């Protein structure tokens, strides 16, 4: 096994003059990379994880920060300009601000973001912002401790709210709240979430329940579509007016209130209105697999290539991954096959 010190002393992979381009067979150009740093999480959300007896990756199977940095160095010249660090819960990875600093120092990035459940954010936000974090997405499915416990099977809503307030202390940090609505659990709290977010001038995005849960309890009856939520909000609060989207690769359809009241709402309609035709994302799992789709059933292993500094193998794996990307995830198709790995193992 190669030590971290030995890896650090090896020459960096350099894709200069490479003919590799991150463009798939349909002409989709890939500019966004999601990096999972751990599969461990401190809650057990219904739409992601099993309630108990979760087997996590051993630490020695996780990519080191050096390896993650090396992978990003390789893909930056190939057109990747946006990075998002995910988990599991990424703030459970020790010294995560060190990775943020490494990535920020690379330069050439348009965006460096983090997705978190927010429970550990208050104690880490100072270091993360100082390291160069530009954006943070915080999961907020409810304001009720009882409902939070039903969704996550743990306590902790107060810690989430503390994390949100701590992040608001940095005006330069872009904050978004993410809410996933389950018809039988938290649908009744949607308007309360909207009022919470708009009163704090925080964009709120609603995400449809996707077939990525470890217990495989997903079904269309539990899905609350973006259309249904938009109609409910318009009827109960005020009509919504769509915003023009300058970036077609963004998954969220964004709206403001037509009567001019403050607030911005987004809807990620992954199930009812897929945005696959404009998808520009690749994913790197915590154990060094590259994926071309959240719902994909194939993975390409780059961990050994990163450890061995094998530019040729890394190039082959990346090219194979990009060229194998399907036109769409096919959730609505009768032959849809749910990925073996649930959300927490893939990276949100």
Image: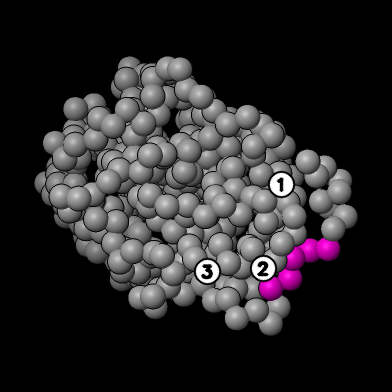
SS at mark 2 in the image: helix
Mark yes or no: residue 223 visible: yes
Circle 3: is it few (<14), some (14-19), or many (20+) Cα within 10 Å?
some
Residue 84 in picture, x, y percent from top left: 54, 53
Task: Give the foreground label among 1 and 3.
Answer: 3
Q: Which residues are magenta?
A: 11-15
Query: Which one is in front, 248 or 218?
Result: 218
Circle 1: is it few (<14), some (14-19), or many (20+) Cα within 10 Å?
some
Image quadrant in which the N terminus is located: top right
Query: Quadrant of the rendered structure where residue 180 is?
Result: top left
Image side of residue 289 versus residue 311, left or right: left
Query: Quadrant of the rendered structure where residue 245 is?
Result: bottom left
Q: CA distance from mark 2 to mark 1?
A: 21 Å
Q: CA distance from mark 3 to mark 2?
A: 11 Å
Disc 1 target residue: 65
Residue shown at 28% from the left, 53% from the top: 270
Mark yes or no: residue 166 visible: no
Task: Give the foreground label among 2 and 1.
Answer: 2
Query: Which one is in front, 263 or 177?
Result: 177
Are the residues at dot 1 and dot 3 in contact (C-beta closer than 8 Å)? no
């Amino acid at each position: 096994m190669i030590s971290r010190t030995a890896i650090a002393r090896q020459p960096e992979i350099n894709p200069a003059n490479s003919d590799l381009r991150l463009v798939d067979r349909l002409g989709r150009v890939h500019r966004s990379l999601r990096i999972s740093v751990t599969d461990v999480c401190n809650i057990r959300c219904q739409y992601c994880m099993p309630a108990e007896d979760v087997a996590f990756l051993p630490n020695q199977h996780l990519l080191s920060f050096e390896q993650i940095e090396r992978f990003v160095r390789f893909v930056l010249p190939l057109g990747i300009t946006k990075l998002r660090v995910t988990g599991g819960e990424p703030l459970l990875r020790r010294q995560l601000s060190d990775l943020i600093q490494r990535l920020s120092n690379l330069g050439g990035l348009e965006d460096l973001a983090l997705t978190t459940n927010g429970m550990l954010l208050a104690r880490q936000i100072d270091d993360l912002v100082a390291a160069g974090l530009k954006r943070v997405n915080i999961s907020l499915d409810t304001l009720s401790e009882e409902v939070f416990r039903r969704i996550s099977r743990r306590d902790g809503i107060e810690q989430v709210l503390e994390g949100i307030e701590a992040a608001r202390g940095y005006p330069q940090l872009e904050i978004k709240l993410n809410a996933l609505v389950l018809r039988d659990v938290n649908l009744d709290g949607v308007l309360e979430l909207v009022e919470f977010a708009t009163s704090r001038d925080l964009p709120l995005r609603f995400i449809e329940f996707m077939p990525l849960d470890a217990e495989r309890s997903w079904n269309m009856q539990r899905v609350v579509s973006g259309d249904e939520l938009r109609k409910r909000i318009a009827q109960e609060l005020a009509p919504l007016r769509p915003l023009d989207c300058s970036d077609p690769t963004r998954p969220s359809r964004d709206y403001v209130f037509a009567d001019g009241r403050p607030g911005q709402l987004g809807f990620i309609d992954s199930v009812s209105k897929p945005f696959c035709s404009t998808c520009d994302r690749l994913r790197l799992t915590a154990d060094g697999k590259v994926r071309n789709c959240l719902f994909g059933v194939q993975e390409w292993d780059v961990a050994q290539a990163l450890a061995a500094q094998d530019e040729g193998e890394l190039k082959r794996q990346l090219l194979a991954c990009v060229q194998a990307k399907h036109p769409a995830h096919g959730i609505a198709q009768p032959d849809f096959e749910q990925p073996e790995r649930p959300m927490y193992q893939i990276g949100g």
